[in-house]
Image (cartoon, coloured by chain):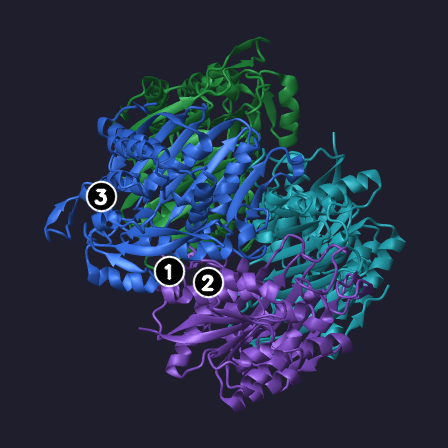
Chain colours: A green, B cyan, C purple, D blue
Amino acid sequence: MSKPLNIGMIGYGFMGRAHSNGYRKVSHFFDLEYRPVLKAVCARSADKVKPFADQWGYESIETDWRKLLERKDIDAVDICTPNNTHAEISLAAAAAGKMILCEKPLAMNAPEALKMTEAVEKAKVPNMVWYNYRRVPAVTLAKQLIDEGKLGKIFHYRANFLQDWTISADLPQGGAGLWRLDVAAAGSGVSGDLLAHCIDTALWLNGGIRDLNAMTETFIKERKHNLTGKVEKVGIDDACTFMCRFGNGSLGLFESTRYARGHKALYTFEINGEHASIKWDLHDLHRLQYFDHRDPGILRGWRSIHVSDGDHPYMGKWWVPGLQIGYEHSFVHQIADFLEGYAKGKPAQPDFRDAYRTQLVLDAILESARDRQWVTIPG
Amino acid sequence: MSKPLNIGMIGYGFMGRAHSNGYRKVSHFFDLEYRPVLKAVCARSADKVKPFADQWGYESIETDWRKLLERKDIDAVDICTPNNTHAEISLAAAAAGKMILCEKPLAMNAPEALKMTEAVEKAKVPNMVWYNYRRVPAVTLAKQLIDEGKLGKIFHYRANFLQDWTISADLPQGGAGLWRLDVAAAGSGVSGDLLAHCIDTALWLNGGIRDLNAMTETFIKERKHNLTGKVEKVGIDDACTFMCRFGNGSLGLFESTRYARGHKALYTFEINGEHASIKWDLHDLHRLQYFDHRDPGILRGWRSIHVSDGDHPYMGKWWVPGLQIGYEHSFVHQIADFLEGYAKGKPAQPDFRDAYRTQLVLDAILESARDRQWVTIPG
Amino acid sequence: MSKPLNIGMIGYGFMGRAHSNGYRKVSHFFDLEYRPVLKAVCARSADKVKPFADQWGYESIETDWRKLLERKDIDAVDICTPNNTHAEISLAAAAAGKMILCEKPLAMNAPEALKMTEAVEKAKVPNMVWYNYRRVPAVTLAKQLIDEGKLGKIFHYRANFLQDWTISADLPQGGAGLWRLDVAAAGSGVSGDLLAHCIDTALWLNGGIRDLNAMTETFIKERKHNLTGKVEKVGIDDACTFMCRFGNGSLGLFESTRYARGHKALYTFEINGEHASIKWDLHDLHRLQYFDHRDPGILRGWRSIHVSDGDHPYMGKWWVPGLQIGYEHSFVHQIADFLEGYAKGKPAQPDFRDAYRTQLVLDAILESARDRQWVTIPG
Amino acid sequence: MSKPLNIGMIGYGFMGRAHSNGYRKVSHFFDLEYRPVLKAVCARSADKVKPFADQWGYESIETDWRKLLERKDIDAVDICTPNNTHAEISLAAAAAGKMILCEKPLAMNAPEALKMTEAVEKAKVPNMVWYNYRRVPAVTLAKQLIDEGKLGKIFHYRANFLQDWTISADLPQGGAGLWRLDVAAAGSGVSGDLLAHCIDTALWLNGGIRDLNAMTETFIKERKHNLTGKVEKVGIDDACTFMCRFGNGSLGLFESTRYARGHKALYTFEINGEHASIKWDLHDLHRLQYFDHRDPGILRGWRSIHVSDGDHPYMGKWWVPGLQIGYEHSFVHQIADFLEGYAKGKPAQPDFRDAYRTQLVLDAILESARDRQWVTIPG
């Protein structure tokens, strides 16, 4: 019989739903020593958080996150609030000895992230950051192939995260649902929101970045601000591109934008190695494209691997070959790995330190774009 | 506050999991008057069904389905057992005044299906059959486009359901996990298992079939039987093809097999109309292909519609544009529609009578293949 | 230095252009003992054929094909006229001792095709029929893979040829450019025009067909006839479907139509074998799709082979890897093979006898559709 | 009756074949006032150029290009020699009053290109550079859509040209077939060879580039040199990436490499506009991908336009809808446009001045990569 692990969630937006669904489902599909229990959900407005708690079956609500941290019956806090609140809550949670699962990007900048990292490491609390795409089975399979040496020496890594939802100049910034457009709440635009995912995956699959050179753009310079009601300067980056060199000698090329008409969530990456190459696309997340030069000459071609077999990562837990899973399952997998890591004393990644490394790259991007020059990544 | 609707499930195999997941999830994503409550699950072996009940949170177990039907606290029975048991259980459930959700194909043959249909209609119990693919959003979108007249007069309907999991002659037949290969339990092979889905969709999208001509094949003539331990004749069809004419004058072409190397669950259909055509493929179930001849000439092309926007069927309930759902969601949608239909007094389809019409086509297929001649569908 | 082989072409329509282009190009890319020389082109109207001769560099014109056959300076005649003229011209050409390259389908029916076949065999003149798709490199590669046993035992063969150009009821039948809609000139509709290609490829790749069952339809029953000016009954099949069993035990499924909105020339085939499967599509003719079950489990997937490498069939003669060729090259290849076969005394296929076998299937299709029953293919 | 325009070609390598094929074919498909006549081909070795002349039907050969330029019967010279010879030959040809068709990149660097441009402009000789991809019908269609305003304001332009043929360290540099790896002959590596194409297309479709920042890499530092027999330093760039801003405010991202395993000639570009986006890929050059946000919401999707209809650019000259053309046809189209422009007194583009502008970008790339800083494009 599994043991309870009591979750206290802070925030109830899009990510609150995605995580709650993960906590709800994980025990039905994974055999784990611990099962998450939805103990409490916290938000400033009781009126708003109560229906959410009812819908997802949280046992209680809180309207002050400090209260939540004081509760003895909470083992882990899940931080799903805007970026500018992650540090304060995390530091307090670490001090309270709670496990922490924090949304990405970890912090508003690298120094803040470092402080948070040192706090959780000092407090020795299990910690994890929600870079969920590592747990899409096709992406995990990519990691497995790279670790097995299937690709050989890596020459190129390229990744995009393209969206098209902010093209209208009439879209306001700030407030519920739109805090990602408000630099005060988000810290940055597409770099922290989208490229952060690409960078996390890249560091995981291809190792550290040595130096980079970035370009950013804000296409719409002013937007009405929902919190002030006034037209205000837009402080975030609408688009961000950077080129870099990895520590392993390969070249990197990254791009992100919210002005790519026709793409909703086109997170793609491609890795070219000496022997083989792989490609992946979030729009068809259940497939991995693979080219192996060691195939017989006349039969070489890009293989479209439908990642749904029982021996593909995580897929033995779900349905039968040929039946695809979707976006939400990446969260279920991350929770399963967190719980299993906790049970075995081998913390799941990415943890705060991993996310701090991503934050160093994010800071370097903004610095490079501002100063129009190459920036070396520390460490 | 939603009202409980108590479910008693019979069977706990692959479909038992898929339905249980649906019952568990539906209330988190859909606002409904009724919420399913997992009251009991029933199977002959208590040792086997107990862990299943624990994993999914069923409140109790039963080992005799007649006992389950006697319980006052059960509102609806969900029949997930092999095909040869559907009739007996359904007739008893109707007599007991239970709502019935029955796995497909409804029955072993059309006369049996008719008897069941008449029983539920006489008992006036809500009834539904699990032809779940109607509720894949891209398929529902196809229905919507057809109903709006986007395609115009229909000329062609073609559908395939191709798999490759029984190619090895060493695979036995019968028993747990393999009853679909045993004609005594399944009634037929790919026709009832796979083509039944294609036919249900076709009747829904394109109306009734007038007459058909079929060919079946059993590639592996004998397999070891798991229940007897002996090598026995294989009674099911391994592959089945038929051509037909619909009542609306269009031509149909259907194929199903478990010997199509490289396809796990390639359920595809394509409909060609005067003005537009559509295509769908279960392997990439989140996309609908659409060609509209009324587009300006130089810009005509097949559109790959990523069915993930808020105004696509069901998708407003899930995540955000660009983030795909998977196979299991079709069951969630069907449960949501069943519950909503029950609340509003407008039963969701396909009901037993719809499934009986599919069964008439299935019977005609086997008859035509046996007699090597055209067969007219009654009604 | 290569030797001349003098061509006399009869007809100057679409196929006349395609063949002329082939004759013109072949010597630039293939090193052959013989080079085609465009000696004469023949058509009833001198006014119409003269500009064609000028454009393509034919040395002379004729307006009576019997005159062309009498000329000593003609080695080979190429018959590009409507189907109902193939027999008469071929018989005369054989009698005149000319090599014959005849457009497909070879004849109006199988008895006519047999007579022609016996005539060329008796006259011992090299003969070939323009089933050009065998020479698309991806299709030739498919043949090579099958012959090497890569697919193992074959279970399924399916092919489509879908077009959408006759959907409008206003399109007339008969006369220049539209003789394919006139049963008197064409003999049949999509079966002889399109399915004939599918059948030729199938017989080549998968061997003979044992028996079949067909369905045909004429959606538009009457069209204005260009030759009479009157609305007349349409005698051709607009759509044709058949299912069959091959001599090797595999099942076949074929379909052709001119009412599939969105498809211009969608000739596709797929072959499923015990070990591997292949797919091809004329709309992307430079690619072959290949799935090999012997690949390591987690890496199995459909490979998209870009057939453009030097070791792919014919491709060493063209450009460099990655640069695709098109439709017209299939004719160049067929001419190259014809010339090489002639030089080496090993006639290229398909010859008249091969095309007669295809005609037997075409006759069986029309018979089966008319009588609504299975028909066994002779031989 | 068309008038002759006498061609003298210098060089007989890969491009010599591609151009010769174009000259041979153009009059068969396009009705033009002038027809190219293959008067002479020139190369240092008579032994090598003679078989080429025979194969393609050149009337004569020369072994000294200066001799060729002196001939009165030559109207136009076509320069297909390595990059380091373009300037000298072009200057002399301009002085001799010959029309010039020069392979790309035009020169070794921008100053050289400017000198050549000024020479042809002063001499008033028709001049053109073989950036042939503008004439792929799908690319020409892209231009047409942009000019019609279909895309609206442009936000992003990205292009790649990826190959994988120099990954082996055993591949030598220099000499016949490998001069592109020798910096002395080529001037640069992938930037001049591959990115030059991407830049030409970009300037044509999206206007001038304001400034850029580039990164280059030479993965294999030393290779055996075929001309010296010694292992020598590799002077070319194996990979090159740059980001830029266009004059119209859009952002650009370009990449080229010969180390992208699995890609033979993956020249792709994508343009994201306010209303619509387009994508193209040389590996499937007969298709254009198009997304239009003005389509009805639920029907929006990327359209795969099979560019083969009669109203698509150039396609009315070839076969029928659905039948694709290939790589070589881009040269035929360019020749047709050159001849038509000459006849009408409206020179076809890109001319030397266009190619000089591309060369300015190429110089800026190498300068930026060397100095690791942003470089502004002159003009």
* Front residue (pair D285, B57): D285
Is residue A51 depicted above or below C366 in this figure?
Answer: above
Asked if residue B48 can be seen in this view, the reply is yes
Badge nearest the viewer, 2 or 3:
3
The label on residue C318 is 1
- Check disc 3 and report its element: helix, strand or loop: helix
Provide the chain ID for the residue under circle 2.
Answer: C
* Front residue (pair B208, C28): C28
The residue where tag 2 is placed is C329
Residue type at mark 1 is Trp
Q: Is residue C180 left or right of residue D161?
A: right
Provide the chain ID for the residue under circle 1.
Answer: C
Q: Residues within 10 Å of mark 2 (few under 14, many from 20)?
A: many
How far apart in space, not on screen, are marks 2 and 3 (Cα)?
A: 34 Å
* Front residue (pair B73, D341): D341
Residue type at mark 3 is Thr
Rendered residue at 32%/17% (across/down): A371
Q: Is residue B348 left or right of residue D229?
A: right
How far apart in space, not on screen, are marks 3 and 1 (Cα)?
A: 26 Å
The residue where tag 3 is placed is D85
Which quadrant holds residue C47?
bottom right
Residue type at mark 2 is His
- Check disc 2 and report its element: helix, strand or loop: helix
- Mark 2 or mark 1, earlier in chain: 1
Query: Hey, which residue is sitting farthest right in the picture?
Result: B122
- Check disc 1 and report its element: helix, strand or loop: loop
Q: Position of residue D353 (x, y in %)?
A: 35, 32
